[in-house]
Amino acid sequence: MNTALQRACTVFRNTRMQVRHRSLSRHQATAPQVRIPTAEKLFHFAAITAGIVAIPAWVFVHLDNYKHHD
């Protein structure tokens, strides 16, 4: 039983070593090829933020309507 356990540990250790060195993607991170203007970044940030906050803000403003609904 002990030799089987040792062999299994060796197999798992070798598999772990192979996985550690394997790349999940063939793409490498590099500097951006096209620079995005700051104004465009700010616009997109504002649009995404407004989209996320819009519904909770609307519910918060109309909370009385939800409380008094029969």
Image (tube, grey):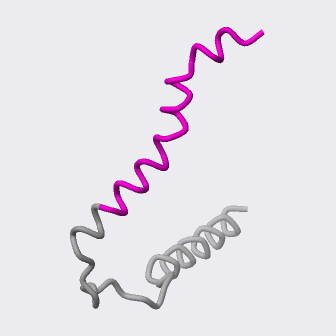
In the image, farthest residue toward the left: 38
Percent x, y of residue 24: 51, 81
Q: Is residue 69 left or right of residue 48?
A: right
The image quarter in which residue 44 lies: bottom left
As rendered, which of 30 and 62 lies closer to the eye? 62
What secondary structure is the stretch in magenta mostly built from? helix
Q: Residue at x 33, y 83 (%)?
A: 29
User: What range is drawn magenta here?
Assistant: 43-70
Q: Is residue 32 left or right of residue 6?
A: left
Residue placed furthest toward the right: 70
Residue drawn 36% across the image and 87% down it: 28
Which residue is located at x 53 percent, y 72 percent?
A: 13
Judge by depth and name the residue closer to the eye, 64 or 24: 64
Where in the figure is residue 60, as x and y percent of width and height? 51, 24
Is residue 48 highlighted in magenta? yes
Tell me: residue 55, above or below residue 23: above
Q: Is residue 44 left or right of residue 20?
A: left
Vertical side of 3 occupied by 62: above or below: above
Specify the quadrant that holds the C terminus: top right
Residue 49 on image: x %, y % = 40, 49
Q: Is residue 14 magenta?
A: no
